[in-house]
Each structure stands twice: as structure tokens, then as C-alpha cells.
Amino acid sequence: MSETKFCKFCGETIPNDAVICTKCGRQVEASAQQSQTPNIVINNSNTNVAGVGGRRKNKWVAIALCLCTGFLGGHKFYEGKTGMGILYLFTAGLCMVGVIVDLISLLFKPNPYYV
């Protein structure tokens, strides 16, 4: 009598060398072709360059807006940060402390910078 094994799907006894269950028809083992290690190809063309994906903004325009309309959040709206712009609008630029912090941080940004 030949050796047997059990189908892992239906539990039926099948011949030991069977790849497909004779009762349920499902594949119980990987075929010899599938059991080989797959050939993996990794193409990593990393194009992460400064500014890719961000919106380009001019430093001097943002500084001018911060000086003139900072308490209204003009520079935040220019950067596309509407939530912060509305917050600056209702809090007078976070009581002008936020405007001063933003002005200092804008001075140290490169021109153009990306948001």
C-alpha cells in the first residue's frame, strides 16, 4: 500500500505524491515550478529632489505679506495653509507673537522655498 497524506482543505486521504486533491480538486502543495525561489527585481529610481511634490513659493513675497498683513494671516494664505490663515485672522496673528516667529523663520528659508 502506498503512503498517503491528508488534504489540508477537506481532510480526505490522498496519495503522498498528489499535488491536487482527488476529492475537492484544490492544490495541496506547490508544484515543483512554484516551489522555486521567485526572481525579484527591484527598480529604485529615487527622484526625491528638494521641492518635488511641494508648491514653490517666493521668500520675499512671503516676508512682505507677513510684514503687511501678518496679523490677518496673509502669508499663511499665500503658502496655501488656509487653516492657519483663518486662525491668524481670528487671533490677530496669535497676538502678533506668531507673526514675529513666522517672520524670523521666513528670513532663514532659502529662496525659493517649497511648501
Image (spheres, helix red, strand yellow):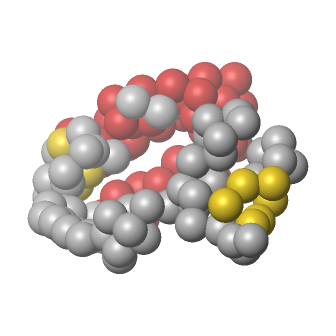
On the question of residue 110 being in view, the answer is no
Between 23 and 66, the one lying in front of the other is 23
* Above-or-below relation of 98 to 80: below
Q: At 33% across and 46% down in the image, what residue appears?
A: 115
Report x, y in % for residue 75. 39, 36
* 70 shown above or below 96: above
Residue 21 in view, yes or no? yes
Position of residue 10 in the picture relative to residue 51 (left or right): right
Find residue 55 and report its horizontal and vertical position in percent. Answer: 24, 39
Q: Nearer the viewer, residue 69 or 25?
A: 25
Query: Compared with residue 57, is residue 74 higher up or lower down, i.e. above or below?
Result: above
**Which residue is found at the position 86% from the left and 49% from the top?**
11
Q: Residue at x 26, y 70 (%)?
A: 40
Is residue 88 rendered to the left or right of residue 113?
A: right
Q: Position of residue 112 (x, y in %)?
A: 14, 53
- Look at the image and tell me in which quarter the N terminus lies: bottom right
In front here: 52 or 45? 45
Q: Is residue 111 left or right of residue 92?
A: left
Depth check: give the residue in front, 64 or 3.
Answer: 3
Q: Residue furthest front?
A: 1
Quadrant in the picture for residue 6: bottom right
The location of residue 34, given as percent across then percent down, is: 38, 62
Residue located at (47% from left, 54% from top)? 102
Q: Residue furthest right?
A: 11
Q: In the figure, is residue 3 to the left or right of 41?
A: right
Which of the 4 image quadrants contains residue 25? Answer: top right
Relative to 82, is 35 above or below?
A: below
How many callouts does the rendering have? 0
